[in-house]
Image (spheres, helix red, strand yellow):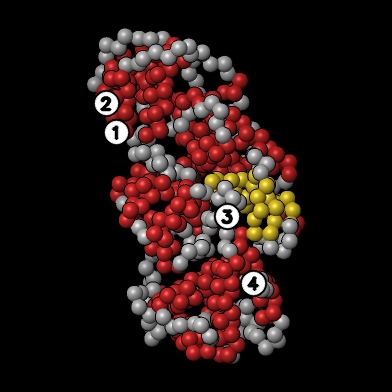
């Protein structure tokens, strides 16, 4: 059986077909889909929908050469009707028509990304008017130009399951995390993703939001429970979704943040990639890049453990081999710093906690003239040794948990602050007469270490109902015994790790 590229070649070898869509556009689109994890069946289905559309254009005598975006909504309706009459196996019902428009929208999006077309507004209007409701409507007369805003948070490029299942799941995720209870999480995620620059670039608006949602769903940790949004959604709603949606969620939860580059082309369909940090080889579909450019790119995104890219948004960056080595050295240093907090940490554990720091490391090397990104001094420190573990005052721990959450700290912050209090007691056991004083002092020390949520002694004294002078005194004892410093790796949070990159 011929593969999809053979089918495209055979189609274009027929002189009678329209020249509205060039062969290289179709092949480029299919290669990009393969790069994003589409299997042979999906690629063949996509090509079948594109092929029917091209045959309609030939029949109708309209080439729209170089101007596909000007095709009016009424003609898309005529195309669907014609396809139902003349294309074997195509039924003019809601599901196949939705699929047709999904493929066409995905293809137009690819063309827009390549600057081949300027916009896809008329196609979007047609798709909404014809197949956007609960039943098909081919009587397109006047189409409302103000389409409803989409809640889709992963685009249709990732389409390994039934379109309606994908759409339903994405809408569920969007509705879930746009609730009021997640406003603080959304704002915090924006701060972490945009970094100190804190702006959304006008010239890369769409890319920014695709990247943000990819980070938010897979790598961000929720304030309340430290789960990623995908994990939280699965735990909370797995009994309330369909079998197909649950399977899709389980597939997504297997994805791991991976940085890789291409070493060689295996054949026209596959390339050999190498994980930058583990050296593991990954076989991936051939991307839509020429070989010279391909060799200069480094990629990061979410990949199945068996090496299949499943996520729509995989970021690429053109760098030299020398800079690739520098990035590897820099991120390896970051993992070593993380290992001070989590001894023996694996690459998976490091990326699971600090993928956003790695993302920003790429940005810093790509946009800022910095020789060193990660602070060296923390790696060279010798920390006080802790002998046999001793019990600690639990009243302080309870106050830390309750008040830190009220102050806007995350569940992970509470854990790290608790470790700070625990380690202090191992080195200098104290008789706690006023737990609130020690809790306030611990929060003061922890917030100063991470520099992203610094709270004054006066404000903490008011919250905990103690004197500011007692907070200062006990905070200084914590600093002296533990030999604390700003960005201390033993108690470094996600915010702290990120902001340390911009402090050197």
- Camera-side residue: 477 or 344? 344
- Camera-side residue: 166 or 319? 166
**Alpha-carbon distance for marks 2 and 1?**
10 Å
Instruction: Give the x, y percent position of residue 202.
Output: 51, 56
Q: Quadrant of the N terminus?
A: bottom right
Q: Secondary structure at mark 2?
A: helix
Q: Are marks 2 and 1 in contact (CB under 8 Å)?
A: yes
**Alpha-carbon distance for marks 3 and 2?**
48 Å
Q: Secondary structure at mark 4?
A: helix
Q: Which residue is mark 1?
A: 406
Compare marks 3 and 2 and give the one earlier in the sequence. Answer: 3
Q: Which mark is residue 4?
A: 4
In the image, residue 51 above or below residue 374: below
Compare marks 4 and 3 and give the one earlier in the sequence. Answer: 4
| CA neighbours of label 2 inside 10 A, class few (<14), some (14 to 19), many (20+) | some
Q: Residue at x 39, y 59 (%)?
A: 243
Along the horizontal axis of the image, is 396 left or right of 248?
left
| CA neighbours of label 1 inside 10 A, class few (<14), some (14 to 19), many (20+) | few
Q: Which residue is mark 2?
A: 463
In the image, residue 80 above or below residue 425: below
**Alpha-carbon distance for marks 4 and 1?**
57 Å
Compare marks 2 and 1 and give the one earlier in the sequence. Answer: 1
**Alpha-carbon distance for marks 1 and 3?**
39 Å
């Amino acid at each position: 059986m011929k593969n999809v590229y053979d089918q495209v070649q055979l189609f274009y070898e027929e002189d009678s077909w329209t020249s509205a869509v060039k062969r290289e556009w179709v092949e480029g689109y299919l290669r990009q889909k393969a790069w994003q994890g589409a299997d042979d069946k999906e690629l063949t289905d996509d090509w079948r929908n594109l092929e029917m559309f091209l045959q309609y254009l030939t029949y109708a005598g309209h080439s729209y050469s170089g101007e596909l975006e000007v095709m009016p909504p009424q003609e898309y309706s005529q195309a669907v009707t014609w396809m139902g009459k003349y294309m074997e196996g195509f039924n003019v019902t809601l599901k196949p028509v939705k699929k047709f428009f999904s493929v066409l929208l995905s293809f137009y999006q690819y063309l827009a990304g390549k600057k081949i077309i300027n916009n896809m507004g008329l196609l979007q209007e047609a798709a909404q008017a014809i197949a956007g409701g609960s039943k098909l409507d081919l009587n397109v007369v006047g189409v409302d130009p103000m389409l409803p805003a989409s809640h889709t948070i992963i685009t249709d490029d990732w389409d390994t399951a039934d379109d309606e299942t994908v759409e339903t799941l994405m809408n569920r995720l969007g509705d879930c995390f746009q609730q009021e209870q997640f406003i603080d999480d959304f704002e915090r995620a924006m701060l972490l993703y945009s970094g100190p620059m804190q702006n959304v670039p006008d010239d890369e608006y769409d890319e920014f939001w695709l990247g943000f949602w990819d980070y938010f769903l897979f790598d961000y940790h929720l304030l309340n429970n430290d789960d990623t949004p995908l994990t939280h959604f699965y735990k909370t709603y797995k009994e309330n979704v369909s079998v197909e949606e649950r399977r899709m969620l389980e597939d997504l939860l297997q994805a791991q943040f991976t940085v890789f580059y291409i070493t060689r082309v295996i054949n026209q369909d596959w390339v050999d990639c190498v994980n930058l940090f583990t050296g593991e080889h990954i076989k991936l579909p051939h991307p839509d890049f020429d070989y010279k450019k391909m060799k200069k790119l480094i990629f990061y995104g979410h990949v199945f453990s068996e090496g299949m890219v499943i996520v729509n948004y995989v970021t690429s960056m053109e760098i030299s081999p020398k800079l690739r080595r520098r990035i590897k050295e820099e991120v390896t240093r970051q993992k070593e710093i993380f290992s001070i907090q989590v001894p023996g940490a694996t690459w998976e554990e490091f990326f699971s906690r600090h993928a956003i720091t790695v993302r920003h490391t790429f940005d810093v090397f790509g946009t800022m003239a910095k020789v060193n990104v990660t602070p060296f001094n923390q790696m060279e420190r010798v920390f006080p040794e802790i002998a046999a573990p001793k019990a600690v005052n639990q009243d302080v721990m309870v106050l830390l948990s309750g008040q830190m959450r009220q102050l806007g700290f995350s569940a992970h912050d509470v854990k790290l602050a608790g470790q700070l209090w625990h380690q202090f007691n191992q080195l200098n056991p104290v008789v706690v007469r006023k737990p609130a004083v020690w809790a306030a002092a611990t929060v003061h020390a922890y917030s100063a270490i991470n520099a992203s949520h610094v709270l004054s002694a006066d404000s903490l004294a008011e919250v905990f109902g103690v004197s500011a002078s007692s907070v200062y005194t006990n905070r200084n004892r914590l600093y002296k015994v533990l030999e604390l410093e700003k960005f201390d790796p033993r108690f470094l949070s996600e915010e702290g790790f990120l902001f340390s990159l911009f402090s050197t």
